[in-house]
Amino acid sequence: EDKVVQSPLSLVVHEGDTVTLNCSYEVTNFRSLLWYKQEKKAPTFLFMLTSSGIEKKSGRLSSILDKKELFSILNITATQTGDSAVYLCAVRYGGATNKLIFGTGTLLAVQP
Amino acid sequence: NAGVTQTPKFRVLKTGQSMTLLCAQDMNHEYMYWYRQDPGMGLRLIHYSVGEGTTAKGEVPDGYNVSRLKKQNFLLGLESAAPSQTSVYFCASSPSTGSGHFGDGTRLSIL
């Protein structure tokens, strides 16, 4: 059975801390791995990773994929209260269907 | 630039009632999806469409039907609502490659 597992389930940190969120997967016909940030409404896209070892960066956020060990990490440095959200990991799989399978998410709370 | 628009945003139904959720996208995307999000379960795929006039079952299709008569619209129907269908429903669209764009969700409560 295909699955995506995220850890930790929740995390509380203080502003300025660095956090690492984990995503492991067992999915047949893997195509890419995506990270989303979900605040109160729609998930918003952060990164898409297709190749191992190539770090994607956007400001204080970065992510990397390991296709041999079947996992990805999302790093957030110098956290701010605005980073508080649920972070979702999803794997795109299959051929022409372009389907995603999601993990349950990591709830990050950044305290002032 | 609306992106993906879902209507309604909130709805309360009684068990056995029917309703249709509408999703509209203005990005000319081929692929459209309906997900439900429940606490501790993440987003689960209900049905999806790879193009106008096509639909297919996802992970949790029972109790739902969909139609994609026009490329920009994807409708999700509940024929006879059940309390187990209380959830937040998200629609998404995507091009053949790249990320998906999500609507703001519909919060549905079934009493």
Image (cartoon, rainbow, N blue to C red):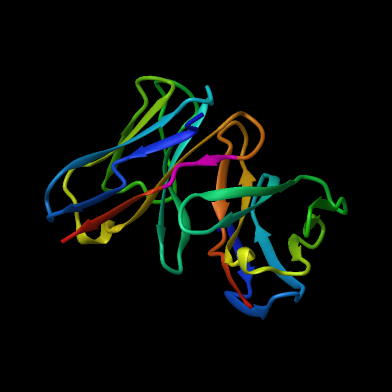
Residue B79, by quadrant, is top left
Query: Residue B87 location in percent, x, y?
Result: 33, 57
Residue B48, by quadrant, is top left
Number of numbered callouts drawn: 0
Residue at point 53% right, 25% down?
Answer: B27
Q: Is residue A80 left or right of residue A109?
A: right
From this view, report whether residue B5 is shown above or below residue B58.
above
Query: Residue A17 location in percent, x, y?
Result: 75, 76
Residue A94, by quadrant, is top right
In depth, the one of B71 and B10 nearer the eye is B10
Query: Residue A78 location in percent, x, y?
Result: 77, 69
Q: Quadrant of the C terminus of chain B?
A: bottom left
From this view, report whether residue A61 is shown above or below residue B54.
below
Residue at point 59% right, 29% down?
Answer: B95
In depth, the one of A39 and A3 nearer the eye is A39
From this view, report whether residue B61 is shown above or below residue A89.
above
Q: Main secondary structure of the magenta part?
A: loop
**Extreme residue in the right direction:** A53
- Queried whether the magenta region covers residue B27, the answer comes back as no
- Queried whether the magenta region covers residue B101, the answer comes back as yes
Residue at point 45% right, 42% down?
Answer: B103
The residue stretch that appears in magenta = B100-104
Residue at point 16% right, 43% down?
Answer: B18
Query: Residue B15 location in percent, x, y?
Result: 13, 56
Q: Is residue A23 left or right of residue A88?
A: right
